[in-house]
Amino acid sequence: MVDTQSAVRYETPTGRWVLAAAVGGSSIAMLDATVVNVALPRLASDLDMGFSGLQWVINGYLVTLSALILLGGALGDLYGRRKIFVAGTAFFAIASLLCGIAPNGETLVAARALQGIGGAMLTPASLAIIQSSFRPDDRGRAIGAWSGLGGVAAAIGPFLGGWLVEAVSWRAIFLLNLPVAAVVIVIAQRHVPESAAPVRPGWHPDVGGGLLSALGLAGLTYALIEFPARGWSSTAIRGALALSVVGFLGFFVVEIRERHPMLPLGIFASMRFSGTNLATFAIYGALGGFFFLFAVHLQRGLGYSPIEAGAAGLPITLIMLVHSARAGRIATRTGPRLPMTLGPLVMAIGLFMARGIGPGAEYLTDILPAILVFSAGLVHTVAPLTTTALASAPPEHAGVASGVNNAVARAAGLIAVAVLPPLAGLGGDIVPDVQTLADGFARACTIAAFAVAAGGVISLLTVGKDKLVAPALDEEHHCSVAGPPLRPAEPHWGCPEAA
């Protein structure tokens, strides 16, 4: 742990360097999770990949990231946050190089899975470094700056990615990570103080739980993506499902018996906590599936360039940046049930409107109105969703509650990218023609609309009327679903602890 008397002050040069390292590291992981969507059509052409191959490009990253992000936070607590942050950044950079030089789709997917491992190491360590490095009275400002700068990176990411794909190559979006990672590593080694959680007898990472959850997710993902082409009679499909069952059953057995489990199952005894995470799964699954198909449809179906496709969703990011804090204050006054019910229903209306985005659609009259309605619902859903997830768990599990909610959101996107295209009549080894893609996109929007509406109904039934305040974590904290796990009141695996 860092001595509070010698901890970093926000206004000092060291404080700015620490913030730069944390923002730089988390940004490369976040950008790769978003800008790759813009590059998918070019990937399909250059590497001769079918639709299922494009699904794997996204899910290869999400499988390892979703399964290992709690374990990544645990490793930072035990072995040192800076050490794991630097190692994760280096690992991510090497995997990015492999992505950038990949000669075929199989190699790219494997490299994306390696990127997910690096992301699972550096993402939780990024916020943990800020929480443990800065003095308590400066920590809130530092985390606010970290969150705000991350939002700026999210806003420019699709523009930058689209420009790189169009002006250079899709390979550039991966190779750009190398110099950024190198700068982040140098800054971290020179300016970021090391910190770790207090060592307790018998305290160790839940490696078995992490590996078994990865096996379960990978087997399920393979079966869902490859089923349209292979069918239930395929030995590979049956084998993948069997491995998935073994992985998930083994995971729950380990979590029950493990002294320090990655996922303490007792927190799900709260109906509000379980309901909030079920709503998260429905809502973020719909988001992941929709954005995957949206980027492909704009380019393949409507003829958008990569940079135009990246810019098309910019209003969503801008609305989230400008109105998230205000939406959080409204939710505080009304209680979480109202916005968590109405927000998803408004999102569903926006998704139904998006069904009309077909060949010949105009951006200002057909696409932008759907995006604006969708964004209005989204901005009023995210803040109360994450606050409720924290507040519904016992105070001693506040950090792991945020980590679980984060992992649920990522796993939902992973499964949605695998299952939504086949349900919409898309998938397989061939990229569909324009009309087939348009019809499939319309069906996918309908399915996604029902999914987010279901999330609103779940919230109505499981979230009480009372106003909730997230458990105090000693200081201000970041509670975005897209953010890494937070620190609990007592050290717990997967949750970075502040000094």
Image: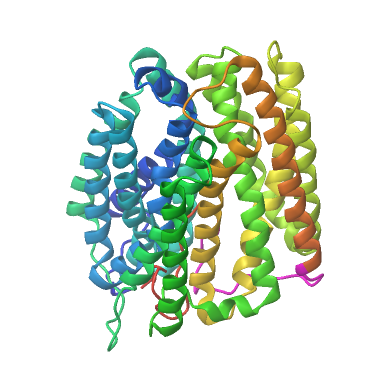
Q: Position of residue 253 (x, y in %)?
A: 44, 78
Name which residue lies at 52% across and 58% down. 406
Q: Is residue 440 above or below residue 8?
A: above
Is residue 478 at least partly visible in the picture?
no
Residue that appears at 59% across and 30% down: 426
Magenta span of residues:
462-479
Position of 381 relative to 203 (above/below): above
Position in image of residue 38 (x %, y %): 48, 26
Asked whether 459 or 189 is in front, the reply is 459
Task: Write down the quadrant of residue 444 in the picture.
Answer: top right
Q: Residue furthest bottom?
A: 201
Q: Determine the residue positioned at 43% across, 66% down.
A: 246
Left or right placement of residue 8 versus residue 272 in this view: left
User: Which residue occupies the foreground of this view, 222 or 141?
Assistant: 222
Q: In the rendered image, which quarter is residue 69 located in?
A: bottom left
The N terminus: image quadrant = bottom left
Residue 99 in the image: x percent, y percent? Answer: 28, 33
Q: Position of residue 216 (x, y in %)?
A: 44, 60
User: Which of the two residues, 362 or 445, is positioned nearer the viewer here?
Assistant: 445
Considering the whole magenta stretch, tell me its main secondary structure.
loop
Rendering colour mode:
rainbow
Q: Could one spot residue 96 in this view of the protein?
A: yes
Q: Quadrant of the C terminus?
A: bottom left
User: Residue 12: within the magenta?
Assistant: no
On screen, 93 above or below 397?
above
Count of numbered tags = 0
